[in-house]
Image (spheres, rainbow, N blue to C red):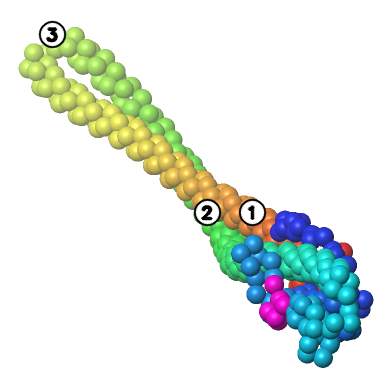
Amino acid sequence: MPFSTPVKRVQRVDAPAGDSNPYVLPAIVCGMNGVGNHGLEDEQAPTVSVLTMPTTRNGASQPSSPPPSSPLNDTTNGLSPFANPSKPTGKVIERLTTTNERLTRELHAEKAKTQSQTEELRAKLRVIEHLNADKETLQSQVDSHERRKNDWKEIERSLTSQLHAEQERRKKAEGQVTGMGIQLDQVNSNAAKKLAEVKQEHLAELANSKKSLSVELIQLKEEFTETRKRAIKAEEHAAYLDAQSKAFTDGHRRIVKEQRNAIDELRKYSDHANYRVDEATAHIKALDVVAGQQSHEMERMQRGVQDMQRVFNGYKEEFNKLKSEGSDLGEQVQKSAAVIESFEKEADEAFRLLKWAFKLNNGDLKKPE
C-alpha cells in the first residue's frame, strides 16, 4: 500500500451494553449514586456528564453539582442528631465516621473512574484527529494522483494525435514515394529508349560516314597512285627529253619548259590530292570527336539516371526512417499506457484506503480486502 499510514489503536475499555462502536464519542455519564447516601436515607445524587464537568489543573474532571452534604448537616427533621438526647453520642460519631469513610472511598472511586473515562475520551479524540489528518493526507494524495492521471491522459491524447499525424504523413510519403517511383521508372524507360535511339542513329550515321569516307579515301589513293605513276612517267620522259635536248638545243628548251610546266601542274594536282586526303582525315577525326561527344552525352544521361536512382534511394531511406519513427511513437504510447495503468492502480488503492478510513471513523473496524 503506497499511501497507508499506521494508526495507533486505542486500548478498548469496557463499553456499556449495546454500544457497537467504541471509537464514537459516547456521552459518558458518571453516576454519583450513593454519594449523598449517608446511611440515614436512600437518596440518589443527580447524574453529571463529563462533557459538562469543569476540569482542575491536572486535567481531572470535577462535578459541577454541589458536593454532597455532610452527615452533620443532614437531619431527620431539620434538627441536629446531637439535639436528640435519646441517641448516644458515641454511636452517632461512629456511624458518621463510617459513613464519611465510605463516602470518601466512593468519591475517590468516582474520581478515578471519571479520570480514566476522561483519558479514554482524550485518547479517542487524538485518534480522531490522527484519522482526520490521515484523511486529509490521503485526500491530497488522491487529488495529486488524479491530477497526474489527467496529465498522463493528456500526454496519451497528445501522443495519440502525434501518432495519427505521423501515420497520415507516412501515408502521404508512401504515396509520394510510389508516385516518384512510377515517374522514375517512366523517366528511366524514356531515357533508355531515347539513349538506344540516339545510339542507333549515331552508329548508323558513323557507319555511313566511315563507309563514304573509306570509299572517297580509296578513290583519292587511287588518284594519287595514278598521279604518281604519271609523274614518274613525266620524269622519265623529261630525262629522255634532256638526253634528246643535247642534240636539239632550241627544241630542248621549249620541251623542258613544257615538261616543267607539266611537272608543276602534276605537283599542284599532287598537293591538291594530299589536301583532299588531309581533309578526309580531318573529317574522320571530326566524326571521331562527334562520336566522343555522343559518348559523353550518353555518359551524362547515365549519370542523370544514376542521380535519379540516388534520389529514389534517399526517398526510400526517408520512408524507412518515417516507418521506424512511427514504430517508436507506438512504443512510447504503449509505455505511457502502462504508466497510466500503474497510476490508476495506485489511485484505486488510495481510494480504497480512504474509504476504509471513513468506515473506521464511522465505527466499522473491518479492513477492506
Q: Residue 106 at x, y = what percent? A: 83, 69
Identity of the residue drawn at 30% across and 31% down: 278
Q: Quick check: is 157 in the magenta stretch?
A: no
Q: What secondary structure prevails in the magenta region? A: loop
Q: Amino acid at mark 1?
A: Asp
For mark 1, what is the residue?
A: 328
Dot 1 or dot 3: first in sequence order is 3
| Element type where label 2 sits in the image | helix
Q: For the residue labelled by badge 1, is the local secondary structure a helix, a strand or a loop? A: helix
Callout in the foreground (2, 1): 1
Please name the residue shown 73% across and 61% down the image.
346
Inter-mark Cα distance, 3 to 2: 79 Å
Where, by quadrant of the figure, is residue 343 drawn?
bottom right
Mark 2 or mark 1, which has the lower sequence index?
2
Residue 246: numbered disc: 3
Does residue 318 appear to the left or right of 363 in the view shown?
A: left
- Residue 21 appears in the rendering: no
The image quarter containing residue 138 is: bottom right
Three-letter residue code for mark 2: Ala
List the residue tagged with mark 2.
191
| Type of amino acid under label 3 | Lys
Which residue reaches farthest bottom?
77
Callout 2: few (<14), some (14-19), or many (20+) C-alpha neighbours within 10 Å? some
Quarter placement of the C terminus: bottom right
Q: CA distance from mark 1 to mark 3?
A: 114 Å
Q: Nearer the viewer, residue 174 or 195?
A: 174
Residue 170 or residue 344, whichever sits in front: 344
Q: Residue at x 35, y 38 (%)?
A: 286
Q: x, y (%) of residue 152?
A: 62, 64
Q: Which residues are magenta?
A: 62-68
Taking the view exactly as shown, the residue that stands out farthest to the front is: 85
Q: Nearer the viewer, residue 48 or 307?
A: 48
